[in-house]
Amino acid sequence: MKVKALLLGMGMLCSLSSFAATELRYGLEAEYPPFESRNASGELEGFDIDLGNAICAAAALKCSWVETSFDGLIPGLLAKKFDAINSAMNITDQRRQSIDFTQPIYRIPSQLVGKEGSGMTDSSAEALQGKTIGVLQGSIQETYAKEHWEKHGVTVVSYKDQNMAWGDLLNGRIDASLVMSAAGQAGFLSKPQGKGFGFIGKPVADDTILGSGIGFGLRKGDDATKKQLDAAIDKVRADGTITKLAAKYF
């Protein structure tokens, strides 16, 4: 009887432990407000941070965060330094050659930010000839600039993080920076240093390069994590969390 009771007790423990939350390690580059950055206290904050925490809660997962440069995110994921990329990464065919993605969660257009009165009126290659444009290294904005502008006499400079590009824009080393519009607004234009700067022309367009939206990057074959996160994304979309966070940050 005691043995039977012990076995039953062990079975209950096993059953309970199977429901314990598992940790999900997010990889991110934390220099891209309002998506992800560190505040004055050194804490991570931003749209993707709140979104990631909400999705973990919906999936009964415990979150942790691993920082690296943006161009190191895919290599880091493949090296199993973390389980998912949550860093405003657009889903593109080029990236799908190396990794998989969850369903798209949101989409933000990309737009040039430059000095007002600079003479740049739009984002065509003709209008930007002789200009120097800053982009985030490893980003779709870098790919777009090299494909559409660099071949036509526009100098493209890549940076490890977006704050370095903003610094060079302020110092006049570059003429403009191509970023996601929300990052341009919240990360630069809305700050005191952004006075005298603004968006140039309309958002750029190229679905092949710019992708179908932003999702979490996953290792190919990790179907269990994809299924779990896709279900959690459906939950936070249905309960209005994504809309509330977008209103808060964008």
Image (spheres, helix red, strand yellow):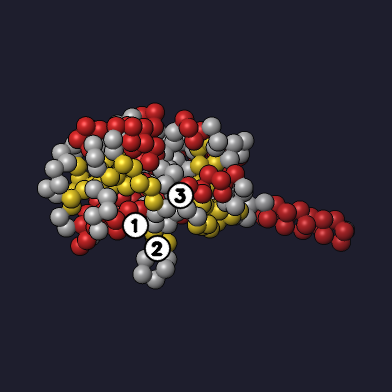
Q: Nearer the viewer, residue 134 or 80?
A: 134
What residue is at 85 percent from the left and 56 percent from the top?
4
Q: Furthest-bottom residue in view?
A: 41
Amino acid type of the residue tagged 1 in the rendering: Asn
* Residue beneath disc 1: 163
Residue 104: give its label. Answer: none
Q: Pointers 2 and 1 in contact (CB under 8 A)?
A: no
Camera-nearest label, 3 or 2:
3
The alpha-carbon separation of the residues under discs 3 and 2 comes to 15 Å
> Residue 237 at what x, y percent from top left?
39, 42
The alpha-carbon separation of the residues under discs 2 and 1 comes to 12 Å
Residue 38: give its label. Answer: 2
Q: Is residue 218 left or right of residue 120?
A: right
Amino acid type of the residue tagged 2 in the rendering: Arg
* Residue 53 in view (yes/no): yes
Residue 149, by quadrant, is: top left
If you read the primary sequence from the N terminus, does the residue marked by circle 2 or circle 1 appear first?
Answer: 2
* Residue 214 in view (yes/no): no
Crowding around mark 3 (Cα neighbors within 10 Å: few <14, some 14 to 19, many 20+) is many
> Residue 103 at what x, y percent from top left?
46, 36
Q: Pointers 3 and 2 in contact (CB under 8 A)?
A: no
